[in-house]
Image (spheres, helix red, strand yellow):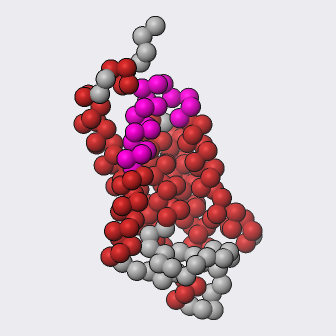
Amino acid sequence: MNSVIVAVAQYLLYFILAAAAAIWLYLPRQNKVGLAVQAIVSVVIAILLIKVVAGLHTDPRPFVVDPSIRPLFAHPPDNGFPSDHTTVAATVAFLVMLYRRWLGALLLVAAIVVGAARMAAHVHHGQDIVAGLLIASLAVGIAAATWRWVRPHLPRQLTEPASV
């Protein structure tokens, strides 16, 4: 069971990223541009928010708080707040949800599973996971609002379907 937890905690994120890339390939051109722009903006915002909240709050990892707890994989004893893995996975899921609601919802479930696995592996607490989910939703919300404001001002060939 521990090997499954470790695999999910460390590698499910890559499946989420690959699934999002595959979904992006099948989007219409104008949606590809929108998703790409929002992804870049969301990631920048998420990174900034991670740095800010990590500077405001410290949450030692479970194996640091209680030395009798052993993490299931090697991990530095740094600040666990917020969970970077959960933040990235949820950011991708929320972005996909903007264009393919059900596929994004499935990826969001996978992102939550990543967070749960990281808790089960003793490298995060619940608050680290919740903070990652909140940061992701805020970052994508800001990026989506910004895109809705910027999109009408862009050249038509970027935001409208190609004419046949």
Residue that extends furthest to the top in the rendered view of this protein = 164
Residue occupying the point 40% across, 39% down: 37
- The location of residue 38, given as percent across then percent down, is 39, 42
- The location of residue 77, given as percent across then percent down, is 55, 82
Secondary structure that dominates the magenta span:
helix
Count the marks: how many?
A: 0
Residue occupying the point 29% across, 27% down: 154
Where is residue 82, by image quadrant? bottom left
Highlighted magenta segment, given as a residue range: 24-42
Identify whether 5 is placed above or below 30. Answer: below
Q: Is residue 43 visible?
A: yes
Identify whether 123 is placed above or below 130. Answer: below
- The location of residue 156, given as percent across then percent down, is 33, 20
Q: Is residue 97 visible?
A: no
Residue occupying the point 63% across, 87% down: 69
Where is residue 110, by image quadrant? bottom right
Where is residue 111, by image quadrant? bottom right
Residue occupying the point 61% across, 76% down: 75
Viewed as shown, does residue 156 lie left or right of 130?
A: left
Q: Between residues 161 and 108, which one lies in front from this camera angle?
A: 161
Identify whether 146 is placed above or below 48. Answer: above
Q: For the N terminus, which image quadrant? A: bottom right
As for residue 75 lying within the magenta part, the answer is no
- The location of residue 120, given as percent across then percent down, is 61, 73
Viewed as shown, does residue 93 lie left or right of 149?
A: right
